[in-house]
Image (cartoon, rainbow, N blue to C red):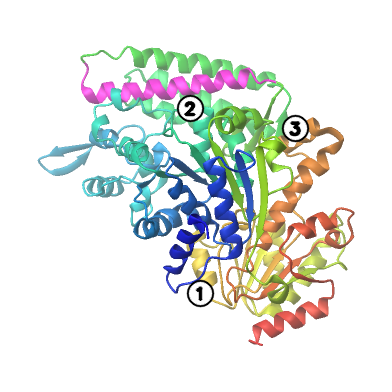
Amino acid sequence: MSRVAAVLADVVGALPGGGEARAGQVEMAEAVASTIAGTAPTPHLAVQAGTGTGKTLAYLVPAVLAGKKTVVATATKALQDQLAGKDLPFLQERMPEHFEWAVLKGRANYLCLQRLAELTARAPGGEQLALDGVAERAPAEELLALARWAATTATGDRAELDVEPSPQAWAAVSVTARECPGANRCPSGDVCFAEGARLRAAEADVVVVNLHLYGLDLAAGGVILPDHEVVIVDEAHQLEEIVSATAGVDLTGGRFTDLARRTRGVIEDDQLAAGVEDAGQMLTEALRPRRDERLRRLPDDVAGVLAVARGRVEQVLAAARKVPADAPEESRSRALRVQQAASALLEDLQAVELVSRDEVMWVEGTDANPVLRVAPVDVSEVLRDGLWAKRTGVLTSATLPAHLPERLGLRRDEVTELDVGSPFDYEAHAVLYCAAHLPDPRSPAYLDAMVDELAGLIAAAGGRTLGLFTSFRVLDAAAEAVAERVDVEVLTQRSLPKARLLERFAAEEETCLFATMGFWQGVDVPGRALSLVAIDRIPFGRPDEPLLQARRERAGAAAFSLIDLPRATTLLAQGAGRLIRAATDRGVVAVLDPRLATARYRWEVVNALPPMRRTKDPAEVRRVLEAIRDGH
């Protein structure tokens, strides 16, 4: 037995309830160990590890044993919390080698003591707040509560709060990376919570971050995260989209409004702030009619607004730079943050005006807050230069799309691809049902037929259903129609905050939960509360989705097989993966899209799903659900 297998066996055996390392877990751990050690055939590794494999320990144990500085980047807050609250503290007690670990988040996740110092003042009548343009939007009692919390917290991490603060209150006591002048230029730099987190990360052996922060580090040339030798990307199927977002630019009217509010706390000339705020409103008005539209070039009216906005932001920047050196410390600190925010905004304005052929520009968001976005079509060069050429990379997920390594800038001879399967007995415990008799989802008759089918399945299951939909329009229509036809409650993702919604769904068995893309992954509800996952259709991207459209154009005739099919297959597999979360779980994945049974590409989709028993018989699947419902 190899050393990594022996230590893994000891660690798994010490878990609550005990246990043995699974074959797939050991295979993955040994592959990770040899890759980090440099003895594997390739310098990088991509591992598909199905639900129940125990992939977290399979990469943490060899990473710690290797003794190399490791960053673990994950897309979900739930996994970050699991790593920090459970897995890493447990490993610290059980591993033969001592190691230190840390969690590092984006700067806006930490309370800013300088902002708080500027807002809080002592007066004979008790605590008072020196409100500025940002803080005046927040309830005073919330700000005072945050001030009291700041005196007791060791980390300043927003996640430690017992009550989630309002966005207005948190904005008043925090800063983003776009406006922070840095510890060396800040009066509170030596006690800064965010800087403290960076120092702990610099000293730690294992650092946990989210993929968004890792993407920002790549875009910034590696100045955010500490130097590291190994990166483990969990939920790696999301890496391409997140790096594309972080390497791009977004402009909203709200960014100008925020700069205007901060300017009013520094510069007495209110016309400057009013001008910037007005520019933000003009940008919102110019973008609103183009929402969900791809822009091949900047429209003349939008370009005109941006030119005006640039001039007004430059005026604010010049005024902030003129704040005298002998001004009160509070004024100088605020002026520095205005300078940082204005400079960042000017950089993004320039990026939007100079969009290259390798980038795509579009407008998304809501009517109230449209967003002008620019993103690279291809992130392979960013990843190749910033990641693969500098350190060992391990990509892992329960589902890895076909061609993912190539899309991420890895040549075939640079990465070993491994599938260690899942220990769960899908053949015995799960059924994949395709409603082959339904109309094509693009047919006008589809929605009514789909709702009828879904209501029948829910009745057979006695609730216990997670309905996953590809759009809010279909979700809302289905929820309203199904609620009238079944005797169980139908919740939607609009009903409650996500955490409370999932708690209620798990606690009340005879309940249904209908949701869209945010729930297709990261939802973990083991046991009888979930015995049916119903998916309305194969989740192909919209033909007019700008970034996908640009990628299709680049791929040419191979676009469907290289872009659309792998993406849809991965999303479908992620959704189907919500069903079996424990070895004793039983249930049905119902895909209410007949193309799964008839399309020429059907086997590529089916083969990417867990190996469940398959059926197209509505009567059979109802009998299965009724048996599970009745405990047989």
Q: Residue 507 carries which label?
A: 1
Q: What element carries label 2?
A: helix
Instruction: Inspect the magenta stretch and tell me whether residue 347 lies in it.
Output: yes
**Residue 508: horizontal and vertical position, in percent?**
53, 76
Farthest-out residue, left: 124
**What residue is drawn where x is 86% and y is 66%?**
438
Report the magenta residues as a range. Answer: 327-356
Q: Along the polypeptide, which appears first: circle 3 or circle 1? A: 1
Q: Name the residue under label 2.
A: 256
CA distance separating discs 3 and 1: 44 Å
**Residue 299: horizontal and vertical position, in percent?**
69, 21
Q: Nearer the viewer, residue 282 or 553?
A: 553
Q: What element carries label 3?
A: helix
**Residue 51: horizontal and vertical position, in percent?**
61, 62
**What residue is drawn where x is 70% and y is 24%?**
358
Q: Along the polypeptide, which appears first: circle 3 or circle 2? A: 2
Give left or right: position of 171 versus 423.
Answer: left
Q: Which of the two discs, 2 and 1, sits closer to the camera?
A: 1
CA distance separating discs 3 and 2: 29 Å
Give left or right: position of 62 versus 443.
Answer: left
Q: Which mark is residue 137?
A: none
Q: Nearer the viewer, residue 443 or 302?
A: 443
Q: Residue 550 carries which label?
A: 3
Q: Is residue 470 among the parts visible in the rendering?
A: no
**Residue 180: horizontal and vertical position, in percent?**
37, 28
Q: Which of the two discs, 3 and 2, sits closer to the camera?
A: 3
